Image (cartoon, rainbow, N blue to C red):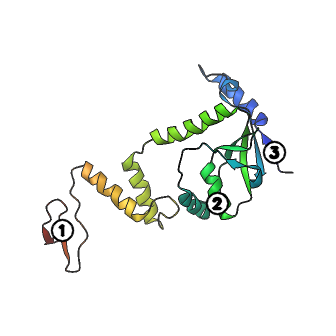
Amino acid sequence: MFPRVDRRGVEGLMARKAKQASGAAPLESLLRDQQYEIVPASELHCHSQNPREGDIGGIHVSIGAHKFYGALIVQRSSGTIIKGNHSFQAGVQKGIDRFPIFWIDCDDKEALEILLIDNRTSDLASYNNAALADLLQGLSNDGGIQGTGYDQEALDNLLHDLSSDLGVIPIEKSDEDGLVACPKCGTRFRL
């Protein structure tokens, strides 16, 4: 038997805190009933209508660097993964045979709606590129950015885009003669 944990123990504390907050909606109206469980991979399957093409390779690298974290969201009646289809696929490729999941009770229509809204809100999100560049540069200076989904080329492109946005003309790296070329006009000179 796999361990089961439900949210009832935490729910009482959170409900009291929610009632204390002015104007906050009651906790019961915002939290979906869900149970956490570790489940064999053989009891789960990806959603057949998922239109998303996830970066399974990137997730595979992440699992190698950070282990599998989080949980899949799974429709209880069917064992269909609603959230985490690509994480599941990458995990199976890595040899994971049991997954942490949250079971939720919903019909097929609502499962599809949850799948779509989860993907769409991710699509609509954006980055503060300056903050992202600062984070990546800090990690790069502290041992590298492996396991972040970014590589040095992506960081260089981000820094180039930021400097262009600020009106700064970046100078390309020097060639074997020690000359650099202005990317705007092509003029080559020694620094």
Callout 2 secondary element:
loop
- Amino acid type at circle 2 is Lys
Q: Dot 1 corresponds to which residue?
A: 181
Left or right position of 41 against 54: right
In 3D space, how far apart are the residues under numbered discs 3 and 1 (Cα atoms)? Answer: 62 Å
Q: Which mark is residue 92?
A: none
In this orientation, which residue lies closer to the viewer: 46 or 55?
Answer: 46
In 3D space, how far apart are the residues under numbered discs 2 and 3 (Cα atoms)? Answer: 21 Å
Relative to residue 148, is residue 177 depicted above or below? below
Callout 1 secondary element:
strand
Q: How many marks?
A: 3
Q: Which residue sits furthest bottom?
A: 177
Give how far across and how far down residue 169 sits, in percent: 20, 57
Q: Which residue sits furthest front?
A: 48
User: What residue do we see at 38% from left, 59% from top?
Assistant: 155
Left or right position of 143 against 168: right
- Amino acid type at circle 1 is Ala
User: What residue do we see at 72% from left, 53% from top?
Assistant: 99
- For label 1, the crowd category at 10 Å Cα-Cα, with few meaning under 14, some 14 to 19 and many 20 or more, is some
Q: Dot 3 corresponds to which residue?
A: 4
Which numbered disc flags the more N-terminal residue, 3 or 1?
3
In 3D space, how far apart are the residues under numbered discs 2 and 1 (Cα atoms)? Answer: 43 Å
Relative to residue 42, is residue 76 depicted above or below? above
Q: Are marks 2 and 1 in contact (CB under 8 Å)?
A: no
Callout 3 secondary element:
strand
Q: Dot 2 corresponds to which residue?
A: 67
- For label 2, the crowd category at 10 Å Cα-Cα, with few meaning under 14, some 14 to 19 and many 20 or more, is few
Which numbered disc flags the more N-terminal residue, 2 or 3?
3
Which numbered disc flags the more N-terminal residue, 2 or 1?
2
